[in-house]
Image (spheres, rainbow, N blue to C red):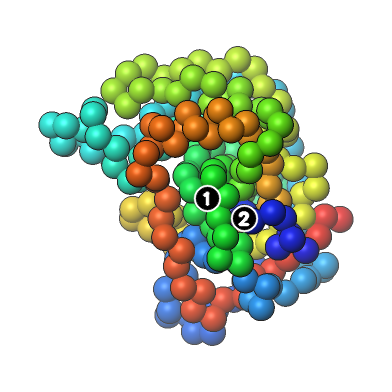
């Protein structure tokens, strides 16, 4: 199971259910074994990612604050913007275009109560406007494509950073098994109806983790939210 990955994971998918339709279905959540069912009949996640240069920009949430350039709002982040038409995923015949990916510290999703130093959210949107987010927890280890993306962080009140061409597929683990559930955005306005697909972890160097955590020294993650009866669906790669 994906729950066996060392201490954490996170983002869009959604075949999970709730006990009552009116209860909140917010994200992130703590992925606990008792809430996970395996379903090999669910449609696979087909990933079609190419190579491209990206632009890393600082996402501000405190533009109206006179001290905004010197302080860190807890919902701010570094966001890599992906050129249109470069990458998409397909589930059950529906295509979702990759628009951007961004980072949180510590990981927003927890696994059995544990978190990892970073989590990457890859945000996709369908032609109808539905959101599907792939969540990838990041643990200390060998250098990866994430290190290339976060080699130089964009300043809050400065210009975006140009990141040379990268293989977007290498952002994801080789195994595309997922844990899926219906949830929400993890920043205001916390809109529900987001499909989360959580994958196994990837590695990033300790130097990159330290660089990101130095910028966001108080963290930029939302606390885990109650499952409220939701089941999480594990879909092995097939």
> For the point 74% across and 37% down, which residue is it?
48
Residue 210 locus on image (x, y percent): 49, 32
* Quadrant in which the C terminus is drawn: bottom right
Q: Residue furthest bottom?
A: 19
Q: Which circle's residue, 1 or 2, is located before the other in the chain? A: 2
Q: Residues within 10 Å of mark 1 (few under 14, many from 20)?
A: many
Which element type, helix, strand or loop, lies under badge 2? loop
The reply to whether residue 219 is visible in this rendering is yes
Residue 15 locus on image (x, y percent): 65, 68
**Is residue 112 left or right of 100 when viewed as pictured?**
right
> For the point 77% across and 71% down, which residue is it?
38
From the viewer's side, name the closer residue of 156 and 64. 156
Q: Which residue is disc 1 drawn over? A: 107
Q: Are the two marked residues, 1 and 2, in contact with CB atoms closer than 8 angstroms?
A: yes
Residue 222 locus on image (x, y percent): 41, 55
> For the point 78% across and 63% down, which residue is it?
1
Q: Which mark is residue 8?
A: 2
């Amino acid at each position: 199971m994906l729950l066996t990955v060392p201490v954490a994971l996170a983002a869009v998918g959604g075949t999970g259910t709730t006990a009552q339709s009116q209860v909140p279905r917010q994200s992130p959540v703590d992925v606990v074994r008792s809430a996970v069912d395996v379903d090999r009949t669910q449609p696979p996640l087909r990933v079609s990612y190419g190579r491209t240069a990206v632009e890393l920009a600082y996402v501000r949430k405190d533009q109206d604050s006179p001290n905004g350039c010197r302080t860190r709002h807890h919902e701010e982040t570094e966001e890599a913007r992906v050129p249109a038409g470069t990458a998409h995923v397909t589930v059950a015949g529906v295509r979702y275009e990759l628009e951007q990916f961004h980072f949180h510290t510590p990981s927003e999703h927890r696994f059995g109560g544990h978190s990892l130093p970073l989590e990457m959210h890859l945000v996709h949107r369908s032609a109808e406007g539905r959101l599907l987010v792939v969540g990838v927890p990041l643990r200390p280890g060998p250098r990866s494509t994430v290190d290339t993306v976060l080699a130089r962080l964009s300043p809050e009140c400065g210009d975006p950073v140009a990141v040379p061409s990268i293989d977007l597929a290498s952002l994801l683990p080789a195994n595309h098994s997922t844990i899926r559930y219906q949830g929400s955005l993890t920043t205001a306005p916390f809109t529900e109806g987001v499909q989360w697909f959580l994958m196994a972890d990837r590695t990033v160097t300790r130097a990159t983790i330290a660089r990101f955590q130095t910028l966001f020294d108080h963290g930029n993650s939302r606390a885990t939210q109650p499952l409220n009866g939701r089941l999480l669906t594990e879909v092995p790669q097939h």
